[in-house]
Image: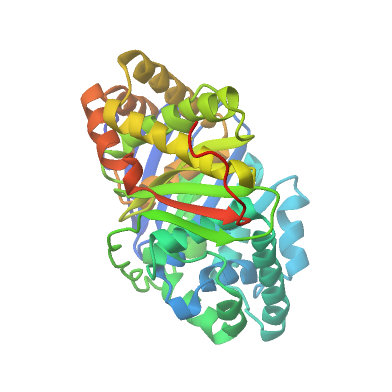
Amino acid sequence: MPVFFASPALPGSVAAHGIVADGEYVESRLANGVVVLTETIPSVRSVAVGVWVRHGTAHEDAAEMGVSHLLEHMVFKGTERRSAREIALALESLGGSLDAYTSREHTSYEARVLDEHLPMALDVLADLVLSPVLRDGDLEREREVVLEEISTVEDTPDDLVFELHADTLWPAHPYGYSILGTRATVAALSSESLRALHASAYGGRNLIVAAAGHLAHEVVVDEVARLFGRIPAGCQRRVVPPPRPHVAGDQRVARDSAQTHIVFGTVTPGHSDPRRYPLVLLAAAFGGGMSSRLFQRVREDLGLAYSVYSFQSFYELAGVTGVYVGTRPEWADRAVAVIRREYETLATRGLGSEELEQTKGQVKGQIMLSLESTGARVNRLASFALFGEPFLTLDELLARVDAVTNEQIAEVAGEFFRPDDQLVLRLGPRAAGGAAEA
């Protein structure tokens, strides 16, 4: 268990320390609200570092859907100190990398560099996040790039089916919005829209700076204070309305394709709910690998699909758990019937003791292997601040997985894996459907 205590005073900040895995976790907060998190890993010579903005698609109005993602693109077109090419060269010329992404609830700008280049990485990230120029001419070009990105999803049915499922599961709610936006909303976005979002969301209270690797916390805090310490605290992010009861049933979207792409899904509690742990274990046992129930039944026993797997996402107020399968149109009804039957078995019987222990071993192993990467470590570090949750050491996290009981599994399976509670969305040809029985 980590012991948290006050650190020596840092200008304009307060801090807490804790011991993690093979290093040290430290958190500080600047006077303007910027949170600074580090995890020191002495055994590596690199650093993964990023800036997370507590704003994503879930905080957008429907008419400006996609504005967070477009702004994330636009910051790379130039800042007050760097051109687009200079941004690209700044870290790549040092052997490092620079990337960004937009999610439903936050936007992330991340870099990975050798430890000696951490100050440069922080300087580039601060430049991107705080000083984009957002020129009209750049917007017209980048708008076309995003429209092409939307076209890519439309041409990729195993991506598009998830967009359609989310929109149907959460109708008219921000959790169902497309992160990319629609053609209509992206076409209507202006430089003024981007500047307004940047001014309202990219203030100190909404920023988290996290780094993991071969570093010293005090050095990181000093650099962050120099680069971010004078920006306004800004406004808190807008509140996302609670989602309404979700839609269940079987819906079909016609599409000419070689396969029918099918997503099952239901709404779950959000990230901080303790039922997240049995839900993760249930999803792993259900469709989390080659040994999972769905892989063995749908692919190995019946040969109905090449790709079948479970998925989960946990947001602040709610989450989703479900299953994807891609199959021939003439086998779609049979695949749905088989998966429904597996849902029913899981909902009524849960997991046996041996299967639960095997699944715990699988999930714990995946967690530990994922943390071999400094990139995974820094994202895990930032996630605690993003969700307002206390930091958990690796041992504490594994202990929570171990603590899940058969009774908890049975309760959660009965609540969230009943087949009649699933929204099933099919994307594919309207073909005659084959046998409905396995």
Q: Nearer the viewer, residue 188 or 184?
A: 184
Coordinates of residue 114 in the picture (x, y in percent): 66, 40
Coordinates of residue 254 in the picture (x, y in percent): 59, 61
Q: Tell me if 47 is positioned left or right of 218 in this view.
A: right
Q: Which of 108 and 328 is in front in this view?
A: 328
Residue 302 visible (yes or no): yes
Relative to 314, say whether 78 is above or below: below
Relative to 72, say whether 358 is above or below: above
> Which residue appears at 78% of the width and 51% of the height?
93
Name of the residue lying farthest toward the top: 354
Asked where in the image residue 355 lies, by quadrant, the reply is top left
Coloring scheme used = rainbow
Q: Tell me if 151 is positioned left or right of 275 in this view.
A: right
> Which residue appears at 31% of the width and 22% of the height?
402
Q: Which of 180 and 80 is in front in this view?
A: 180
> Which residue appears at 42% of the width and 76% of the height?
61
Coordinates of residue 71 in the picture (x, y in percent): 57, 71
Q: Quadrant of the N terminus?
A: top left
Q: Tell me if 55 is positioned left or right of 329 in this view.
A: left
Asked where in the image residue 161 lies, by quadrant, the reply is bottom right
Relative to 345, say whether 223 is above or below: below
> Which residue appears at 29% of the width and 25% of the height?
349
Residue 393 visible (yes or no): no
Number of marks drawn: 0
Coordinates of residue 122 in the picture (x, y in percent): 58, 55
